[in-house]
Amino acid sequence: KQEVTQIPAALSVPEGENLVLNCSFTDSAIYNLQWFRQDPGKGLTSLLLIQSSQREQTSGRLNASLDKSSGRSTLYIAASQPGDSATYLCAGPKSGGYNKLIFGAGTRLAVHP
Amino acid sequence: GAGVSQSPSNKVTEKGKDVELRCDPISGHTALYWYRQSLGQGLEFLIYFQGNSAPDKSGLPSDRFSAERTGGSVSTLTIQRTQQEDSAVYLCASSFHGGGANVLTFGAGSRLTVL
């Protein structure tokens, strides 16, 4: 059974810091790994998707890595801004041909000016 | 449409009543998913549609929950005889097809409160 764990559960940092959010999963047969952002009262926004054959993906100030052998993914946020404040969720589907995502509980990030 | 639309955005109901939640996926997306997010909990998978078929409904919590999809488009999640523990945000997502390489696009959710 796939389980996804995210550390830390919450993080509060001053603006400008570089951040690392951690995600670990128990089943290395994970097909891909997605990072999402959720703002209060809103749905989820997909940030990055890393295929199982890839090791990392980058989008602007965000970089996500995937190490299937160790069961870990990290989301790196460079030069954090107050607008980055949100809950960040990682999720991966079990192998099986479709996108049934198993989510972590999320990291709640607050970036203060 | 441009995104995944869900309605109602908020629903308050009395225990024992039935509710229907609607999801209108992105046009052309064949795969549709329902998730539930309870207060302080992670997202919980409910059901997956490919076209109008539901090959995986393993996450539906009880037989009070059902869902259908018509025309390969709009989906309705129905909760009968609602209970207080059904209170949650119900999120719908769609993707181009069900394969693992596809990014899921989520709607804003329907917040259900059962009094």
Image (spheres, coloured by chain):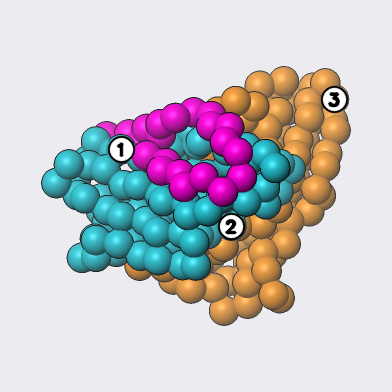
Chain colours: A cyan, B orange
Element type at mark 1:
strand
Disc with the residue nearer the chain's start (2 vs 1): 1
Is A68 included in the stretch rendered in magenta?
no
Q: Are marks 2 and 1 on the same chain?
A: yes
Q: In the image, residue B41 lies at what x, y percent?
A: 55, 28
Q: Look at the image and give the residue range highlighted in magenta.
A: A1-22
| Pointer 3 residue | B14
Which chain is disc 3 placed on?
Answer: B
**Quadrant location, the C terminus of chain A:** top right
Element type at mark 2:
strand
Element type at mark 3:
loop
Q: Nearer the viewer, residue A113 or B93?
A: A113
The amino acid on which the numbered mark 2 sits, given as a three-letter code, is Thr
Can residue B39 be seen from the camera position used here?
Answer: yes
| Pointer 1 residue | A24
Which of discs 2 and 3 lies nearer the camera? The answer is: 2
Which numbered circle lies on residue B71?
A: none
Which chain is disc 1 placed on?
Answer: A
Is A5 included in the stretch rendered in magenta?
yes
What residue is drawn where x is 41% and y is 51%?
A: A76
What residue is drawn where x is 67% and y is 39%?
A: A112
Q: Are marks 3 and 1 on the same chain?
A: no
- Against A113, is A54 above or below? below
| Pointer 2 residue | A45
Residue lying furthest bottom in this view?
A: B28
Which of discs 3 and 1 lies nearer the camera? The answer is: 1
**Cα distance between the residues tagged 2 and 3:** 31 Å
**Cα distance between the residues tagged 3 and 1:** 39 Å
